[in-house]
């Protein structure tokens, strides 16, 4: 198969488009980010990258906390909207009919309709260029019971997660195999 050279860019895919909540609990904001990822397992750390010009950047920087709310594919309209409208001008919870629910540890709200909510406290901010990377230590996780399998793990088949790549939203395909299956023989 022939390869074509491309200029350096953001070609990693798929990415998890996440609804990040931040700001005070009485006036929380939502920003959609796809530049989100697990960076460490012990302690669990999630990184989110936000442009300094975005309203949410100041909220996260000031409060030192944020929540990663994992949407379902059915929430694609809210995901797209919350990434294209500024919280400076619009109450995105109200506009999208989403429910701000109390977090367990942090002071901002989580999104009730999202089946997984991951609360983070900022450990460090790293300026990278167009974006600042906020390293968030996971301090609490809430998962809808309906998503759990018999072993208490999240069943992605039940979660119906959304993926993002090439400026488009996707759902995940079918199950292929569990991690570590090659070591079992």
Image (spheres, rainbow, N blue to C red):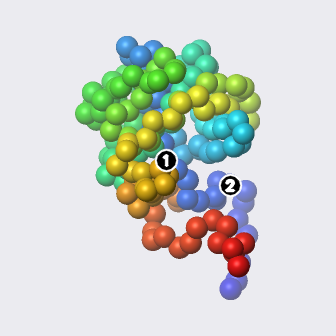
- What residue is shown at x 47% (from left), y 24% (from top)? 104
The residue where tag 2 is placed is 9
Is residue 123 or residue 6 the one in the foreground? 123
- What residue is shown at x 30% (from left), y 29% (from top)? 99
User: Which label sits on residue 146?
Assistant: none
Callout 1 environment at 10 Å: few (<14), some (14 to 19), or many (20+)?
Answer: many
Residue 130, how many percent across, how many down?
A: 67, 36
The residue where tag 1 is placed is 17
Q: Quadrant of residue 46?
A: top right
Q: In which quarter of the image is residue 179?
A: bottom right
- Above or below residue 98? Residue 88 is above
Residue 171, how many percent across, how many down?
A: 42, 61
Residue 129 is at least partly visible in this image: no
Residue 145, how many percent across, how many down?
A: 37, 44
Is residue 28 or residue 183 the one in the foreground? 183
Q: Distance between the residues labelled 2 and 1?
A: 18 Å
- What residue is shown at x 43% (from left), y 56% (from top)? 149
Q: Closer to us: mark 2 or mark 1?
A: 1
Q: Is residue 35 left or right of residue 17?
A: right
The N terminus lies in which quarter of the figure?
A: bottom right
- Above or below residue 167? Residue 115 is above
- What residue is shown at x 58% (from left), y 67% (from top)? 178
Residue 140, how many percent across, how many down?
A: 54, 30
């Amino acid at each position: 198969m022939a390869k074509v050279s491309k200029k350096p860019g953001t070609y990693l895919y798929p990415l998890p488009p996440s609804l990040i909540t931040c700001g005070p609990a009485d006036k929380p904001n939502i920003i959609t980010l796809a530049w989100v990822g697990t960076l460490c397992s012990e302690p669990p750390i999630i990184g989110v990258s936000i442009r300094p010009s975005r309203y949410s950047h100041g909220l996260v920087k000031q409060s030192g906390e944020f929540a990663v709310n994992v949407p379902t594919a059915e929430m694609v309209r809210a995901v797209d909207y919350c990434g294209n409208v500024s919280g400076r001008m619009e109450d995105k919870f109200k506009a999208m009919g989403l429910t701000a629910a109390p977090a367990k540890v942090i002071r901002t709200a989580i999104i009730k309709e999202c089946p997984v909510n991951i609360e983070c406290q900022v450990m460090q901010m790293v300026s990278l260029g167009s974006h600042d990377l906020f390293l968030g230590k996971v301090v609490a996780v809430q998962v809808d019971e309906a998503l759990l399998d018999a072993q208490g793990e999240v069943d992605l088949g039940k979660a119906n997660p959304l993926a993002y790549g090439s400026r488009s939203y996707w759902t995940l395909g079918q199950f292929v195999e569990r991690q570590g299956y090659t070591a079992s023989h």
